[in-house]
Amino acid sequence: MFHSFGPILMQLVLAIGFAGAIVALTAIIGPKKINPVKMDSYECGVDPFADARGAFHVKFFLVAVLFILFDVEAIFVIPWAGSFLAFKKAGLGLFIYLEMAFFMAILLAGYYYILKKGALKWE
Amino acid sequence: MTEIMTDTISTNLQTIISTMRLGLLAPHLIVSMGGILLMLVSLLKKAAFKINAFLAIVVLGIASVCALNTGSDPQTGFNGMIKSDMFSNVFIWIYCATGIFTVLISHKYMERRKINVPEYYSLLLFAVSGLMFMTSASDLMILFVGLEILSVSLFVMAGIDIHDLRSTEAGLKYFLMSVFASAFLLFGIAFVYGATGSTEYSAIKDFALSNSFGRSPYLYAGVLLVLGGMAFKISAVPFHMWTPDVYQGAPLPVTAFLSTAPKIASFGFLFKFMAQFQNVQPYPDLLEDIVISLAVLSMIVGNLLALNQEDLKRMLAYSSITHMGYVMTAFASRSDTAISAALFYFAAYIFMNIGIFAVIAVISENNDKNLTLENFRGMAQKKPAMAFLFMIFLFSLAGIPPLIGFAAKFFVFSAVIQSGLYGLAVIGILNSAVSAYYYLRVVINMYLKAPEQDSGFDLNAIKYGMAEMLAITSCIAAIIILGLQPTSLIHFFEKIAL
């Protein structure tokens, strides 16, 4: 049963080998001239001014969780859109349409709930 | 060429869609739709808690009636992902009954403790729908989805008392442990899929039969991991560490639900899943040994740890570990008699456990977090009726003859003996005798000890609620009637084949 994993193993070896080789080559043949400007934060970066591991307000998490919940719907919607025509050809157009309508109704019930509960109000 | 391809796709789609038989999922859909409905009802400011309690009972009642509709013949649907038969129907009834009892004992308790969040009932319904999917599944993916619906609802329910540190701790602890167990389970499912190329039970069965289980180390590893993940949910030793803390911290009605339905569902899944390997020759020894050691450890360790508990809820947590150990012995004996005995045990366990938690919910006016065995001293003098009911539940849990607990243990151990596992039956019976000690300790405190003067716990303050009394009396009636007449129920269960 192992022969079917052969390509994966080959890809793994290639990926590790290539990455390792690049890092090794840079370390060996790259010029090493260190000056203060070079070691500074890059143009688009900002000098760190505090510890990043501080406490965040719980509202951030609430919004993040709600965002994930409603973002995951794309997992259903995109394959649905992709296979819609195949269903339509099979004469199941109404069925597949109603499936999504039903899914959206459940999603909207949840959205109405969080809206009414004020989960999206920041103040 | 493309014409032919679209034609095959079309026929494939039509065949797949034709297996979508919504009738098989009627109870599941009713309960989950009910959950959404209750969620929206919760938005009403006034009396939503009361309306939801009523609606939850109605929804669960309708769902249990709908389970009758699918009939007793096994039917598969949804491209082989759902299998509905008498076995899954029995479990649906068990879940609905547990749900209804939980609603009955929740209402007054939650109001008294000011945690009357209307969403609680919505979560309960979602949990019940997850349970139903777990035992109706005939595909590991559906099982996992059902388990997650259940678990996510239970995390919130366990931690619903946000002003109480213990409850929050219980929620968090249950969350972490459950996620850990789910990882085990999912890892196991991945191995099973890797070995057999399918997550469907029947395909896994075909693979195991044709390749003689033991020759596929991946299937072996996968099944063991699935077993381990489920042992967490059942809280079989050595996967039991979370149980006492969660039981102690969670609000009482949630503990009542937590200690019954999810464990029964996990066992239901295990019975259904492991039945696929029933005819594998030779049956893998290691698997058998592991199940037997889970059973023996659960019985012995659960009992030993319960002996010294002063806190009533912790004691019941350890005793529930022991009870699941008894069911595990039935699971280890792999026979049809054992399955019917286990089903009977589940029915008995629900009445005993829900009943005893209902009594405790009534007794614990405000301070159930530290409900010690000492608090019950002299209860028979102050509240004779309540003490008597409490005693019957304790006797039934201990397995004293005319009650259902005895009949349940009798059926389980006789099934174990029939399968030739004499040692396991002896250990079980000895443990059952040991367990009488800690149940009777409460009875002795209630009847033979003088009431404590300054315990800070006023037994006279106990007030009965109508709903709670309804739950308690129906549990008592079931315990006594089914204890005296267990034959009709066990005959009904014997007809159920997997």
Image (cartoon, rainbow, N blue to C red):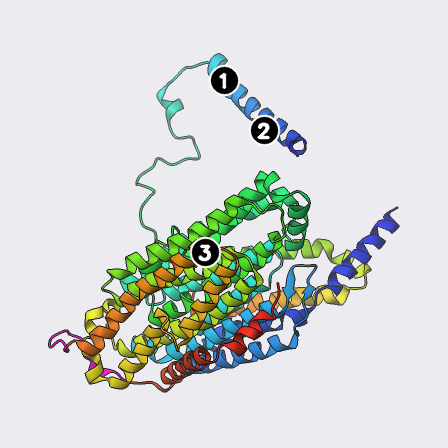
Residue B142 in view of the camera: yes
Q: Nearer the viewer, residue B41 or B296?
A: B296
Residue A4 lies left or right of residue B293; in this view the side is right
Q: Chain of mark 2?
A: A
Residue at 19 percent of width and 70 percent of height: B374
Alpha carbon of mark 1 to alpha carbon of mark 2: how far? 18 Å
Q: Which residues are magenta?
A: B450-463
Q: CA distance from mark 1 to mark 3?
A: 66 Å
Quadrant in which the C terminus of chain B appears = bottom right
- For the residue marked with disc 3, what is the amino acid? Tyr
Q: Which residue is mark 3?
A: B422
- Report the side of B207 relative to B337 (left or right): right
| Residue type beneath disc 1 | Ala
Image coordinates for residue B73, horizontal then vertical, percent: 68, 70
Q: Earlier in the sequence, mark 1 or mark 2?
A: 2
Instruction: Tell whether position B459 is magenta.
Output: yes
Residue A24 circle label? 1
* In the image: residue B51, left or right of residue A77: left
Q: Are marks 1 and 2 in contact (CB under 8 Å)?
A: no
Say which element carries label 3: helix
Do callouts 3 and 2 point to residues on the same chain?
no
Which chain contains the residue that carries disc 3?
A: B
Q: Nearer the viewer, residue B360 or B315?
A: B315
Q: Residue B274, located in which quarter of the rendered image?
A: bottom right
Label 3 crowd bin: few (<14), some (14–19), many (20+), radius 10 Å: some
